[in-house]
Amino acid sequence: PEDYYLRVKEMHEKGGSGSIGYRYDFKREEAMKNLLRTHTTAVSSQMLYKLANQKGGFTPQRYFSIDRVFRNESMDATHLCEFHQVEGLVADYNLSLGDLIGTIETFFKKIGITKMRFKPAF
C-alpha cells in the first residue's frame, strides 16, 4: 500500500523510532526492482506487520518457513550461491530465551533431528 511505502521511504531518508535512517534519497524505481532474495527476513517482517495490524488486534502466533535464497558468493566445496534457509518466529508477550530454545528444539525434533547443542555466538 502507498502509505506503507511512504513510511519506509521516510524511515530510510530521515529515520524514526530512535534510528537516524540511511540519509539518502529513497527512489521508488530502485525500490521496485526485482532481485533474487538473499534471505527470508522480508517474508517474516511482512508476516509480523500483518499480525500487528490484523482486525481484532494482536494474537500470539508462530511462523516457520523454508525457502530458497541466493548469495553472490564464489562457489567452492562448502559454499553455493543458492541454498534453502529455515526461519521461524514466535510472537507473544513475555517470551524468554528459554522459549526460543524450546521452539527451535521442537521444530528440529519434528523433522527428525534430535541431537542439538545451543551455544552463544557473536
Image: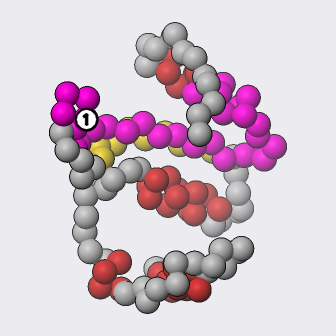
> Is residue 13 magenta-colored?
no
Residue 101: x and y in percent read 65, 27
Whether 81 is drawn above or below 37: the answer is above
Question: Is 110 placed left or right of 55 in the picture?
Answer: left
Q: Residues within 10 Å of mark 1 (few under 14, many from 20)?
A: few
Residue at numbered disc 1: 79
Residue 46: x and y in percent read 50, 61
> Which residue is drawn at the image coordinates 70% and 51% (left, top)?
59
Whether 31 is drawn above or below 108: the answer is below
> Which residue is drawn at the image coordinates 71% and 74% (left, top)?
18
Residue range in magenta is 76-104
> Which of the 4 image quarters holds residue 80?
top left
Residue 116: x and y in percent read 54, 15
Evaluate whether residue 88 shows in this view.
yes
> Which residue is drawn at the image coordinates 63% and 42% (left, top)?
90
Q: Nearer the viewer, residue 51 or 107?
A: 107
> Which residue is drawn at the image coordinates 76% and 40% (left, top)?
95
Query: Which secondary structure, mark 1?
Result: loop
| Amino acid carrying mark 1 in the image | His
Q: Nearer the viewer, residue 54 or 77?
A: 77
Q: Nearer the viewer, residue 50 or 89?
A: 89
Evaluate whether residue 62 shows in this view.
no
> Which of the 4 image quarters holds residue 32?
bottom left
